[in-house]
Image: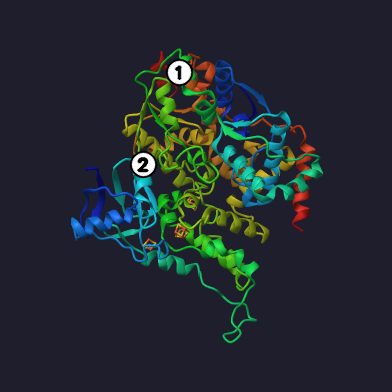
Amino acid sequence: MRKITYKIERFDGVNNFVQEYSFPYQPGKTILWGLITIKDSLDPTLAFTAACRSAVCGACAVRVNGQAVLACETPLDAILERFGDTLTIAPIQNFKVIRDLVVDWEPQAARLAEAKTWLQPRDEFDARKGCRQTAADFKKINTQAACILCGSCASECSKLSANDQDFLEPFTYSKVWKFVADTRDKSAAERIQAIQDKGLWKCMHCAECITKCPKGLAPGEDIARLRQLSIKMGYTGNPGARHALSFVKDIEDTGRLNEAKLQVRTIGLISSIAKFPMALRLLRRGKLNPFHFPGKVKGHEQIQAILKAVRESEK
Amino acid sequence: MRYAFFPGCVLEGAAKENYIATTAVAKALGIELVEIPGWTCCGASHVQDVNDLAATAINARNIALAEQMGLPLLTVCNTCTLMLRKAKTKLDNGQKDQVNGILAKAGIKYEGTSEITHLLWVLIRDYGLNKLQGLIKRPLIGLKVAGYYGCHILRPPAVMDFEDHANPQSLENLIRAIGAKPVDFAAKLKCCGFHATYTAEPDVIRITGETNQSAAEAGADCIVTPCPLCQMSLDMNQTEGQTAVGCKQEMPVLHLAQLVGLALGLSPEELGINMLIAGRELIKARIS
Ligand code: SF4
Ligand code: SF4
Ligand code: FES
């Protein structure tokens, strides 16, 4: 008889340990079915959360072989085909574990609240008239509105895993963008201002959040939207914005990057000199040539025409 | 086999050795790479932070140039591949007319006839590992290689659909084909942080240190990556990364073309191995 094995990373409040459970395979089941089977027939002490069982409540996210998924909607057969009949199941990362697969959302909820992710209705609305918007306007934020706060994006976020003190959970950026883009909300400018020192330019572009979201959100792309708007609003004095603008300038000037200039424009001359050991290493290996100024590429006038047309189309 | 070659800015600058290695390997394999005249920077995952439409439009031009050559477009950089494929996905799913309106100002047109591919995919899908195996002159028997994918050759899977993003095998298969041994290591799918080099530097240094340490602990002699930006991040930050994680082991980080080139019998000089920062001598000693 075919057996499935879950190696579960458990925590009893004091100790971490891995416990193995084997149970008979059944076709057409989910990851959550396996957890329920273990709890019902092998070990009632196993703790995990799940409520709706239909990918709506967001409670059941776990890591399967290092990848965050919703246990209730993830077909076991597909995962077994991917990884074989033994799976490692762990709680999602970047959350405090309460017990076994159960994580504490309280601190994350507090961080989310700091970003004021609720509607601040425009002054023309009131309790009697309500707060209406057209279907077309809602469509603009439909995707972001679908977030179920499962935490999968936060679990695999490269920046959050490296340091969560100067960065927020990816879903928070998506929520901030949702309210910035919501025609009923009056606080877009304040929201953009408030996000400036909340890690806006520290995202590593790893696309883990986009890959892991079970609801089709792309927090990494919402971060790009927030960055675009903040540049438009004049927040250009930080290394992140300067770096991005520098790429556009090089493309417009010659078509290609100028690495030496890029660094100076991004972090300034003084910091560039402070990076001397690294630069020296590159120079010594012939990887950096401070005298390399790429000439204009063939068809450079096309690039200028394209960028000009882009700007005009957005007026 | 002919491809419209898109080297990307980093191969003109800090990763010249990858230009050298890619050209040498293509020649040895009989793959013709015709550099796209007038290609520009792909935006490097930064231009969309200023203007999304500009990012799509400049890459529509890059792709249109390959189309004019009647060839599929080949890159050797994960981020270039993603930027170009992202533009193509948008163009082929509704943005074509809008962007062609912009390109018309420059007298060019995007048709949608050229595929965007990466050297790794070409070696596996177009060239074939059997054929590659037949050309191996220096089988790298016993060399333990940690295949480090880098984000943008896998993610997001809606745009990068070559293989399973959660359990990719292309690097491992390639490593086996050239006689070496793939090692499994915890950081295989991790991010190198390159795109936040200037904004989250301490984090980047530590995660590159962790990746090199993870490969060392798994017994790897070297890392290989299909992305020159990952290579730079793991190689350039190595001293600082070692200090950050307390791991003293030097870890050579090879470009994909360099590893394949060694197996094809090319010399370290012909592959620009001398331009690596960490572990040059380790690699040379290992193959002599
Ligand atoms: S793209 Fe940015 S926000 Fe998304 S997971 Fe990576 S670092 Fe986090
Ligand atoms: S953005 Fe997606 S992955 Fe992140 S919490 Fe919301 S639904 Fe889950
Ligand atoms: S149990 Fe509600 S989302 Fe899975």
Q: Left of A209 or right of it: where is B242?
A: left
Label 2: how many Cα within 10 Å (few below 14, some 14–19, many 20+)? few
Q: What residue is rendered at 29% in x and 42% in y? A: A85
Residue sitting nearer the eye, B263 or B254: B263
| Amino acid type at image mark 1 | Gln
Compared to A23, does B118 lie above or below? above
> For the residues carrying marks 1 and 2, which lies nearer the camera in this image?
2
Q: Residue B271 in the image: state x and y as whole percent.
A: 53, 20
Residue sitting nearer the eye, A265 or B219: B219
Q: Residue A312 in the image: state x and y as whole percent.
A: 78, 54
Compared to B281, does B250 lie above or below? below
Compared to B233, does A119 lie above or below? below
The quadrant in which the N terminus of chain A is found is top left
Specify the subunit that label 1 lies on: B
Task: Calculate the distance from the C-alpha at mark 1 to the C-alpha at mark 2.
Answer: 28 Å
Q: Which residue is mark 2?
A: A81
Q: Left of A266 or right of it: where is B70?
A: right
Residue sitting nearer the eye, A65 or A249: A65
Q: Residue A175 in the image: state x and y as whole percent.
A: 52, 64
Element under label 2? helix
Q: Is residue A195 visible?
A: no
Label 1: how many Cα within 10 Å (few below 14, some 14–19, many 20+)? some
| Amino acid type at image mark 2 | Glu
Q: Which residue is mark 1?
A: B133
